[in-house]
Image (tube, rainbow, N blue to C red):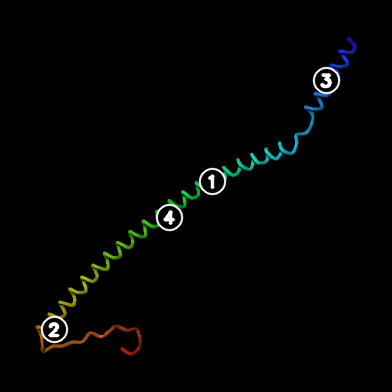
Amino acid sequence: MRILSITYIIFLSSCGLIVGQEPNENVKKEQEFQELLKKSKEIQVKSEVAINVATEQSNKTITKAANTIVTLKEEVKELKQELNETKKKLDSTNDVGNDIKFNLLPISGGEENR
């Protein structure tokens, strides 16, 4: 019985040494690697969200710029049409009254017109 109890004590103490040992380097490295993978996945998710937001804002900006361009083209077209109509009126007025001729001079802000 004494031998059995001594063997049992030795067995328990050796188990305590095995269980109480520090984890070896491979286990630590694996844990660090897993943590790095977890952080990498979190960063990737945040990056995807940021890219989606940036793409959305970029699309809004492009759409707004395209709409502005279309509006400006329409305004230019209307102004050209008005200019052509005004030219026609001036030409027709000039043709009717050959006795009265007038010249259109450019408007300038300098002192040369005073």
Q: Quadrant of the C terminus?
A: bottom left
- Closer to the camera, 6 or 56? 6
Q: Position of residue 17 (x, y in %)?
A: 82, 27
- Which residue is disc 3 drawn over? 11
Check whether the beta carbons of the residues at disc 1 and disc 4 lie within 8 A of each other: no
Give the foreground label among 4 and 2.
Answer: 4
- Which residue is disc 1 drawn over? 46
- Which residue is disc 4 drawn over? 58
Displayed quadrant of residue 58: bottom left
The kind of residue on which mark 4 rests is: Ser
Q: Earlier in the sequence, mark 2 or mark 3?
A: 3
Q: Earlier in the sequence, mark 3 or mark 1?
A: 3
Q: Position of residue 36 (x, y in %)?
A: 63, 43
- Which residue is disc 2 drawn over? 94
Q: Quadrant of the N terminus?
A: top right
Q: Residue at x 30, y 65 (%)?
A: 72
Q: Is residue 28 left or right of residue 6?
A: left
Judge the density around disc 1: few (<14), some (14-19), many (≥20) Cα neighbours within 10 Å: few
Q: Position of residue 61 (x, y in %)?
A: 40, 57
Q: Residue at x 61, y 42 (%)?
A: 37
Which residue sits furthest left?
96
Q: Earlier in the sequence, mark 1 or mark 2?
A: 1
Tell me the element at label 2: helix
Give the foreground label among 3 and 1.
Answer: 3
The kind of residue on which mark 2 rests is: Asn
Judge the density around disc 4: few (<14), some (14-19), many (≥20) Cα neighbours within 10 Å: few
Q: Earlier in the sequence, mark 3 or mark 4?
A: 3
Displayed quadrant of residue 18: top right
Q: Residue at x 64, y 39 (%)?
A: 34
Q: Residue at x 18, y 75 (%)?
A: 86
